[in-house]
């Protein structure tokens, strides 16, 4: 995954090149150069997402405009930079070198800390980590947008979609919602020159690297010293909360987080330099707000709620005028015009998502937020629970102190107004309060997953507020607080920051040990179970064009992954993906040129050699001799499939039926031979009743004993679907080992031959 790390760095500098010119040109003179450098990467991303949206709407696939936009965006940025330097001669002479030293060091540390686990663990660590469904959905849509015009799917029928690629029927559904994030995934993969399915994790990491600049500068605007601003930004980007949001694999939310931070920074800058702010700053704010809406429309209510609290508190304390707010109409007009020009309508999707979040509850919080709800005092501060009691006591006390400091700082900043705070601290308090109001509303209405989700929107502000307020209290002599208490608060903050940065280092060990945080996200069921390195298979097919390949592996997630990995010049028939889409698989009469099979399942059932393989899969090339024996395409067993030390397959039958897909060269009968083992879940009987179906029609019912060695089943030529079901019911619910599978009949060393 070292190539992915290089791709992340290339994209970071690409966004910086695109964003630096507009930032210098549109910002006002106050700290213009420092601000421009810090926000340039995030601004470049915002501009690319907007440009990409309209390119997609004009029916240009990402592959056709990716490099063109990189060249045009960079050229425009260069011209704006040149205009700035010619117009403002000497305007950058007072650049603070120490500032850029801290900023550069922070970017470097963020990159190292966040990319090291990926490089160490590789695909075995990154693929299907946390949330495989969202991850594969974004890859599916990104692949479509990279290769096809947006409107093509709308007019194509199902057969046309499935023939172009097995993932396209799902892509057509996803196109009705949001797709800007998937387009950006495809664009960054093009810039990195890495396939989308391999770059997707790096794309998510890129968002946290882009977050560093806005958090760092916002911390400085809140009054922190540079060293504390550096530590605070690292804690937000690589600490526990950052890791959690990354592992949810909700790409659009991850992108929106750093965009909202950029928006808050711009507004804090406008409010700090109200008399010097020009039209350009409001244009930048409008661009950022539009990009947020395109990427993640669901976060817009949270954004406006936070801004309403901020401006409402200012007006209530008579520290603001409505005349100042009128300038923001420029920003809102830019965003609204962009939103209304996008199809499908984003506001319709926003309504749908709000109804989902506030409507019927679900149990997803058990999978994502168990670590938080089991101990909110420590979970809120990203302090994972420990089994060692003294450590548990320490982090619990630390969490309680930070919680009290957070509550006090929100009340003091927004309501007491005994001291005028910087707009940055006021905005942090406003967005933190917005998070908690929304959280408690959803929590007390039983929407625990949505409540946890809203906290993940606001975590940067919740964590930054007590740090900024506490350090301001410690440094400001006007606060009538004892020196000892100031030192204590400062010590608590430094301890918490240190723990969060150390958690970023601890993540390096997870790929090596597999030890996750206590009560952390319930990882996807297929995480770490497969050999995702399919380079041998893709290399064998690299020089083939228009070749036909059948993917016939038992696991639907692996099957879908192989469909992403095989490349673009291959005709793919993916049996598992078709079944996942709940349609009847086709019944072809001819075999393809190539076939990918489960190695453990099929090792006993093929009489010809593979041309490529890894530890889990075989790539077969067909010839006339290949069609003289049956081919096992897949075995779907609800109790799983295992392999012994020799590589032979073994599985338990019971409960739902076991399904076989077999391709036959001619009509007749197949013979299934195996070692049949009477399972332990029905100990009072030493035989099992099996019902056999072919193409959903019952063909036989037989009694299996320990002496049974073979089963004879009638078949047709071509593709056959066979279902085997044990009609007996278990009388034991659980073994002493804790296994609850209905283990009624074991099948070992299954072999299939044509009679």
Image: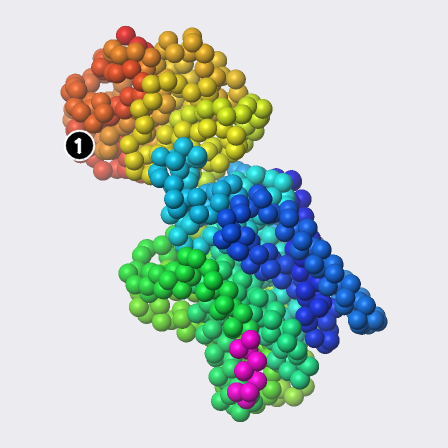
Q: Is residue 399 above or below residue 107?
A: below
Q: Quadrant of the C terminus?
A: top left
Q: Residue at x 30, y 63 (%)?
A: 359
Q: Is residue 75 left or right of residue 411?
A: right
Q: Is residue 82 left or right of residue 246?
A: right
Bin the neighbour count of mark 1 within 10 Å (Cα to Cα): few under 14, some 14-19, many 20 and up.
some
Q: How is the image coloured?
A: rainbow
Please provide percent x and percent y for residue 134. Answer: 43, 48
Q: Residue at x 60, y 71 (%)?
A: 283
The front one of 80 and 481 is 80
Q: Residue at x 52, y 55 (%)?
A: 53
Q: Is residue 429 magenta?
A: no
Please provide percent x and percent y for residue 304. Answer: 47, 73
User: Which stretch appears magenta?
Assistant: 321-330
Which residue position holds label 1?
729
Quarter where residue 30 is shown: bottom right
The dominant secondary structure in magenta is: helix
The front one of 563 and 651 is 563
Question: In this view of the protein, can residue 398 be seen by the observer?
Answer: no
Q: Is residue 398 above or below residue 684?
A: below
Q: Is residue 326 magenta?
A: yes
Q: Is residue 710 left or right of residue 73?
A: left
Q: Is residue 485 above or below residue 290?
A: below
Please provide percent x and percent y for residue 334. Answer: 54, 70
Q: Quadrant of the N terminus?
A: top right
Q: Residue at x 52, y 17 (%)?
A: 611
């Amino acid at each position: 995954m070292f190539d992915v790390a290089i791709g992340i760095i290339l994209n970071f500098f690409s966004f910086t090149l695109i964003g630096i010119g507009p930032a210098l040109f549109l910002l006002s003179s106050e700290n213009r150069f420092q601000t421009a450098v810090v926000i340039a990467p995030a601004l470049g991303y915002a501009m690319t997402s907007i440009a990409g949206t309209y390119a997609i709407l004009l029916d240009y696939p990402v592959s056709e405009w990716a490099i063109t936009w990189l060249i045009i965006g960079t050229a425009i940025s260069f011209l704006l930079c040149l205009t700035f330097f010619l117009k403002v001669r000497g305007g950058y002479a007072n650049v603070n070198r120490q500032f850029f030293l801290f900023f550069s060091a922070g970017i470097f540390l963020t990159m190292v800390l966040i990319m090291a686990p990926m490089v160490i663990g590789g695909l075995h660590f990154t693929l299907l980590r946390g949330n495989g469904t969202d991850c594969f959905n974004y890859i599916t849509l990104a692949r479509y947008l990279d290769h096809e015009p947006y409107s093509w799917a709308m007019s194509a029928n199902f057969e046309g979609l499935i023939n172009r690629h097995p993932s396209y029927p799902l892509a057509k559904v996803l196109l009705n919602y949001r797709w800007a994030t998937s387009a950006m995934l495809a664009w960054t993969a093009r810039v990195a020159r890495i396939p989308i399915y391999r770059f997707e994790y790096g794309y998510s990491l890129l968002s946290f690297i882009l977050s560093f600049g806005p958090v760092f500068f916002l911390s400085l605007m809140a009054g922190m010293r540079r060293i504390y601003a550096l530590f605070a930004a690292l804690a937000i980007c690589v600490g526990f909360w950052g890791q959690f949001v990354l592992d949810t694999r909700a790409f659009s939310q991850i992108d929106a987080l750093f965009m909202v931070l950029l928006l808050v920074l711009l507004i804090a800058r406008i409010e700090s330099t109200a008399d010097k702010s020009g039209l350009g700053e409001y244009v930048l704010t409008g661009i950022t707000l539009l990009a947020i809406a395109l990427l993640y429309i669901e976060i817009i209510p949270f954004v406006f709620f936070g801004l309403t609290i901020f401006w409402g508190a200012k007006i209530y304390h008579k520290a603001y005028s409505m005349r100042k707010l009128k300038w923001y109409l420029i920003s809102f007009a830019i965003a609204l015009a962009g939103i209304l020009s996008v199809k499908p309508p984003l506001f319709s999707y926003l309504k749908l998502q709000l109804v989902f979040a506030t409507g019927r509850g679900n149990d997803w919080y058990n999978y994502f937020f168990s670590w938080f709800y089991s101990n909110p005092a420590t979970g809120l501060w990203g302090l994972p629970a420990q089994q060692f009691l003294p450590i548990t006591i320490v982090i619990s006390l630390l969490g309680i102190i930070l919680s009290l400091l957070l509550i006090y700082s929100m009340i003091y900043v927004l309501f007491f107004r005994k001291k005028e705070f910087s707009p940055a601290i006021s905005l942090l308090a406003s967005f933190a309060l917005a998070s908690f109001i929304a959280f408690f509303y959803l929590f007390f209405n039983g929407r625990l997953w949505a409540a946890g989700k809203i906290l993940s929107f606001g975590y940067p502000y919740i964590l930054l507020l007590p740090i900024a307020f506490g350090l301001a209290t410690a440094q400001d002599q006007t606060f009538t607080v004892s020196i000892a208490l100031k030192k204590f608060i400062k010590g608590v903050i430094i301890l918490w920051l240190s723990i969060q940065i150390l958690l970023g280092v601890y993540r390096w060990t997870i790929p090596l040990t597999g030890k996750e945080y206590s009560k952390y996200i319930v990882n996807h069921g297929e995480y770490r179970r497969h050999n995702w390195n399919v380079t041998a298979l893709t290399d064998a097919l690299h020089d083939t064009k228009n070749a036909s390949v059948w993917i016939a592996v038992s696991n639907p997630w692996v099957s879908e992954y192989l469909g992403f990995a095989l490349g673009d010049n291959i005709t793919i028939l993916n049996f598992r993906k078709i079944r996942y889409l709940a349609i009847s698989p086709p019944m072809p009469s001819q075999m393809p040129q190539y076939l990918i099979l489960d190695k453990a399942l099929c090792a006993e059932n093929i009489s010809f050699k593979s041309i490529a393989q890894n530890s889990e899969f075989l790539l077969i090339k067909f010839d006339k001799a290949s069609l003289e024996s049956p081919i096992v395409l897949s075995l779907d067993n609800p109790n799983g499939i295992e392999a012994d030390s020799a590589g032979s397959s073994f599985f338990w039958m019971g409960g739902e039926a076991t399904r076989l897909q077999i391709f036959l060269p001619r009509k007749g009968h197949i013979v299934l031979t195996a070692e049949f083992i009477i399972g332990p879940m029905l100990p009072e009987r030493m035989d099992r009743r099996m019902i056999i179906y072919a193409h959903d029609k019952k063909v036989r019912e037989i009694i299996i004993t320990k002496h049974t060695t073979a089963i004879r089943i009638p078949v047709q030529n071509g593709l056959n679907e066979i279902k085997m079901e044990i009609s007996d019911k278990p009388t034991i619910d659980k073994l002493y080992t804790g296994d609850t599978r209905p283990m009624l009949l074991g099948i070992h060393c299954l072999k299939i031959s044509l009679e």
